[in-house]
Amino acid sequence: MTSVTRLGTMVGMRILIIGGTRFVGRHITGAAIAAGHEVSLLHRGRTGPGLFPEAEHLTADRDGDLSVLHDRQWDATIDVSAYLPSQVTSLSGALSTGQYAFISSTAVYRTPEARGFTEDSPLAEIDGPVPETVTGETYGALKVLCERAAAEAFGFPTLVVRPTYVIGPHDHTGRFTYWVNRIARGGEVLAPGDPGDPIQVIDGRDMAAWIVSMVEGTHPGTFHAVSPPPPFSFGDMLEAIAAEVGPPGTTLTWVGQDFLLAEGETGRSLPLWSEGDPWMSVNTADPTAARAAGLDPRPLGQSIREIREAESSFSTDATITPAREAELLSRWSERGA
């Protein structure tokens, strides 16, 4: 297939996606194929190897032998799975491509950030040797180093996308999906912490279609893929979910942070809860630049309905059980009696 320029965009592009079969990458692959591009996927063959038979599947571990990329040329590469700067550098040494697009994170910022911060805000830095392990503490700063490695290796046309929490069908983390399915069961729902805590999300399908459009136009730069614009809170989010899928009689009971922490609950058992950490400010990013470049998220209510339809049977062992939730709600109520 030969790429053609039409009205400032590339159509029929050869696009390489690093990953491409799990959640964010899966949506990007689907968007690229739907747009008529010739797609190659580089992955280890462990997750969704039977997906996208119309795409070329290149089986390799990006941390190992990348010779499968040699003597090939792509118009654009979209990298969904780099977490260490060495992964970006090794990929650049094996790859011949036009634009390189890197999926980063709003976790790259030094916290706390002022509400409505922009893409040129101060970034997290690593003091000392570069860690070789990705943890909750090192994740953001390592993504910063990945961004810098990308700019050095691939130059001016590099596109950096910084999403917040990504939601939508096929979300293996189950974070937002937990709240959709829990509230859909109705009754008294344990809502953690402060309802005023900030939150932002982005539907992976909307982000994917936008990223494909950006590489079609070889649009460089750094952009927040977040929605909605601040202020938007955890309380707003749960109320929006309740309005869409909560049966009559559904109520939200806000349980205090100190009580939950003393009980050993975390943002894993109660997903997306910030536990009062200062990094919650990264959920107040300004989406103006991405909106001006064409990012157009669907209404949150639509995402909620579609997630419920697609993922109603989704469950994860990490989240709080109904019995534990009822126990905590009872004990919280007794404190106020």
Image (cartoon, rainbow, N blue to C red):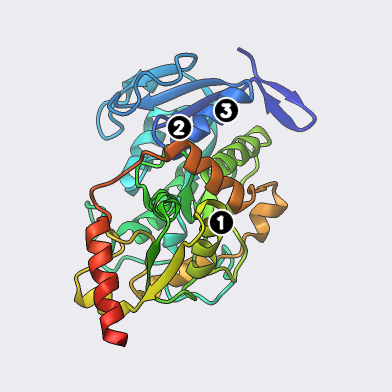
Give the residue number, with chain letter if any, for mark 1: 226
SS at circle 3: helix
Residue 202 point in image, percent of width and height: 54, 51
Circle nearer the viewer, 2 or 3: 2
Please report the residue visible at 49 percent of the width from the left and 48 percent of the height from the top.
151
Q: Is residue 2 above or below residue 268?
A: above
Q: Is residue 42 above or below residue 272?
A: above
Please report the residue visible at 56 percent of the width from the left and 75 percent of the height from the top.
115
SS at circle 2: helix
Frontmost residue, 175 versus 244: 244
Question: For residue 32, which numbered disc appears in the image?
Answer: 3
Frontmost residue, 269 versus 142: 269
Q: Amino acid at mark 3?
A: Ala
The tag earlier along the polypeptide, 2 or 3, is 2
The tag earlier along the polypeptide, 3 or 1, is 3
Residue 69 point in image, percent of width and height: 39, 22
Q: Residues within 10 Å of mark 2 (few under 14, many from 20)?
A: many
Give the residue number, with chain letter if any, for mark 2: 26
Q: Amino acid at mark 2?
A: Arg
Quarter of the picture containing the C terminus is: bottom left
Residue 37 point in image, percent of width and height: 60, 21
Frontmost residue, 332 versus 86: 332
